[in-house]
Amino acid sequence: MLLGVLLLIPSWVIPFALLQHVVPAGELLPLHYNIHLGADFAARWYVSLFYPAFATLVLVLNTVLAARLRRTEKLLAMILTVSGTFVALFTLVALFFVLVL
């Protein structure tokens, strides 16, 4: 869980520190890119906060479920903890590619 939290910190900082100042006021930020159509989903910069919000929700829910199941289902608790960390990692990678795009 600690690794997931450490991965989520830059996921929250990137939209506030970088995207807010990179995208001019009133302009749209491309949030999804398709190889056939190009940028097919664009929105204001603050919509990019949905990515870390979803990852934080998944990490918290998985941690709560893992804590409840730790005594009876150790394997399931470990899978929930690791999957929350992977969601945080993929969110950080997705925000990196949004910034590059």
Image (tube, rainbow, N blue to C red):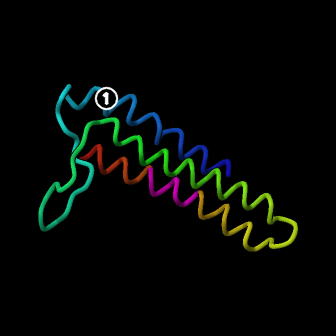
- Across and down, in percent, residue 16 comes to 40, 30
At label 1, the amino acid type is: Gln
Q: Is residue 64 above or below residue 69?
A: above
Dominant secondary structure (helix, strand or loop) of the stretch shown in magenta: helix
- Across and down, in percent, residue 47 comes to 34, 41
Is 66 positioned to the left or the right of 42 in the image? right
At x 80%, y 71%, the residue is 74
Quadrant of the image occupied by residue 17 = top left
Q: Is residue 94 above or below residue 9?
A: below
Is 77 positioned to the left or the right of 100 in the image? right
- What residue is pinned by disc 1? 20
Quadrant of the image occupied by residue 80 = bottom right
Q: Is 36 contained in the magenta span?
A: no
Q: Nearer the viewer, residue 86 or 51?
A: 51
At x 50%, y 55%, the residue is 89
At x 27%, y 49%, the residue is 31
- Across and down, in percent, residue 98 comes to 29, 48
- Magenta-tinted stretch: 85-91
- Across and down, in percent, residue 51 comes to 42, 48
